[in-house]
Image: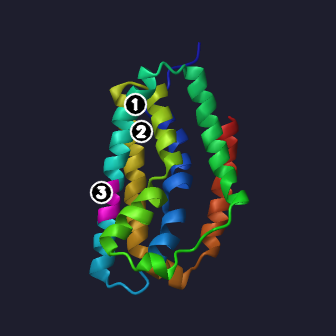
């Protein structure tokens, strides 16, 4: 019999997944590109709106998503397999897709619209991140575990919000290279977790 899974176990497994799926590595370049010519107040409002929308979406995924899977009668072994596939395939996706930079056409939208898409959805809250959260709470269905999963996701949003506030400075002073290296490192770790 396996030892019981603790809240710390859940957090240790979930944090690196969410860091790669919805963390600052992907948020910084998108936010910086969308806000190159915007004032500080607009950037802050956009970051706050995207963070709050993302928090609402994550709450829905964590507290309602597993119920949907449960109603469909999906087995735990299927959840483990699906989780491994989602994690592995999402880590491999950057190897097979070409990055599409934010264009001037995207900047024609209002900051309120940009906070929704592309910032909150799919940059911060991707379908892959939602899938991972739903699978975690379906596999660990107690309220305590759901709160832990939501807490880790909310902590990631705090990191994202801080990253958005510092995105302009980061891109101007440090640039993309560290983000690319970190993305590659976390991608390898994500593949390993997916296979695990």
Q: Which is more toward the observer, 100 or 58?
A: 100
Residue 171 visible in this rendered orientation of the protein: yes
* Magenta-colored span: 49-53
Membership of 50 in magenta stretch: yes
C-alpha gap between disc 1 and disc 3:
22 Å
C-alpha gap between disc 2 and disc 1:
6 Å
Which residue is rendered at x = 47% and y = 57% of the image?
122
C-alpha gap between disc 3 and disc 2:
17 Å
Label 1, residues with CA under 10 Å away: few <14, some 14-19, many ≥20: many
Q: Name the residue under label 1.
A: 145
Q: Mark 3 points at which residue?
A: 52
Query: Which residue is situated farthest in the top direction here?
Result: 1
- Give the prevailing secondary structure in the magenta stretch: helix
Helix, strand or loop under label 3: helix
Residue 52 image point, x, y percent: 30, 57
Helix, strand or loop under label 2: helix
* Of the two numbered discs 1 and 3 in the rendering, the one whose residue sits closer to the viewer: 3
Q: Name the residue under label 2.
A: 149
Label 2, residues with CA under 10 Å away: few <14, some 14-19, many ≥20: many
Which residue is rendered at x = 61% and y = 41% of the image?
86
Q: In which quarter of the image is the N terminus?
A: top right
């Amino acid at each position: 019999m396996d030892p019981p899974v603790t809240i710390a176990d859940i957090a240790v497994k979930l944090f690196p997944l969410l860091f790669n799926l919805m963390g600052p590595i992907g948020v910084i370049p998108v936010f910086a590109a969308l806000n190159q010519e915007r004032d500080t107040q607009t950037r802050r409002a956009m970051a706050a709106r995207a963070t709050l929308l993302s928090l609402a979406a994550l709450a829905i995924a964590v507290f309602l998503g597993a119920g949907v899977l449960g109603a469909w009668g999906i087995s735990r072994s299927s959840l483990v397999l699906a989780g491994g596939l989602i994690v592995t395939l999402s880590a491999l996706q950057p190897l097979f897709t070409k990055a599409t930079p934010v264009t001037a056409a995207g900047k024609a939208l209002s900051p309120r619209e940009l906070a929704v898409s592309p910032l909150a959805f799919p940059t911060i809250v991707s379908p892959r991140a939602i899938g991972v959260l739903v699978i975690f709470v379906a596999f660990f269905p107690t309220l305590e575990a759901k709160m832990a999963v939501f807490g880790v996701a909310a902590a990631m949003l705090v990191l994202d919000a801080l990253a958005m506030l510092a995105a302009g400075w980061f891109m101007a002073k440090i640039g993309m290279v560290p983000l690319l290296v970190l993305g590659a490192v976390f991608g390898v770790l994500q593949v390993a977790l997916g296979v695990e």
